[in-house]
Amino acid sequence: MPDTAALPDEVYADDEIRSVLRECRTIAMVGASANWNRPSFFAMKYLQEKGYRVIPVNPKEEAAGSEILGEKAVAGLKDIDVPVDMVDCFRNSDAIPPIADEAIGIGAKVLWLQLGVRHDEAAAKARAAGLTVIQNRCPKIEYGRLSGEIGWMGVNTGVISSRRNRRV
């Protein structure tokens, strides 16, 4: 995994994000919801359709014995019995430090904080432990943007262009 050290305005190189999305196959989604109209549900479904195994981490769902999109919910990262490549966090910024500690503890490679989620101290601790950290981004959106899928919907991703490259 590349060492992703975000600039203050959270600019990540496309190659770094591509590498993370290519190398990660198992994702623990902290804050996954069984509610079909929640963003975490959409993201989980999309990522599963792209071939990722997404394990929902949600104590409320686990206590109810729930499955979300065919995967049994677990209460915490330590309850997952397979290696996890990425921890994707659908929690508020204040909840991130203990999640980062758990991600380090289970040997995850990536800590990914969703849109609107940022915790610089937890990110620094995770980076120091060898994790790649991406903040304030969504892997579903990044996958769609980098694969060109979003471009088909009229969004200018800057990835595919009919313009000829001109040297400056």
Image (cartoon, rainbow, N blue to C red):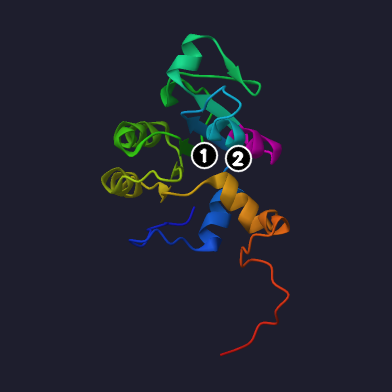
Residue placed furthest toward the bottom: 168
Which stretch appears magenta? 44-53
Local SS, label 1: loop
**Residue 67, x across and y down, in percent:** 60, 17
Label count reads: 2
Front residue of 49/35: it is 35
- Determine which quarter of the picture holds residue 122: top left
Left or right, 150 with reference to 96: right
Identified at 51% across, 59% down, the residue is 16
Q: Amino acid at mark 2?
A: Arg
Instruction: Tell me the residue that label 2 is attached to.
Output: 25
Q: Residues within 10 Å of mark 2 (few under 14, many from 20)?
A: some
Residue shown at the point (36%, 62%) measured from the top left: 7
Q: Which residue is mark 1?
A: 85
Looking at the image, residue 146 sits to the left or right of residue 13; the answer is right
Mark 2 or 1 closer to N-term? 2
Query: Disc 2, disc 1: CB below 8 Å?
Result: yes
Q: Residues within 10 Å of mark 1 (few under 14, many from 20)?
A: many
Residue 80 x %, y %: 49, 23
Element assignment for label 2: loop
Q: Name the side, left or right, on which 109 lies relative to 52.
A: left
- Residue 142 locus on image (x, y percent): 57, 52
Q: Is residue 14 above or below residue 143?
A: below
Quadrant in the picture for residue 39? top right
Q: In which quadrant of the rendered image does the C terminus lie?
A: bottom right
Amino acid bearing label 1: Asp
Look at the magenta stretch and give its main secondary structure.
Answer: helix
Whether 158 is drawn above or below 27: the answer is below
> Which residue is nearer to you in this view: 78 or 96?
96
Rendering coords of residue 28 (x, y %): 51, 32
Name which residue lies at 61% across and 35% down: 42
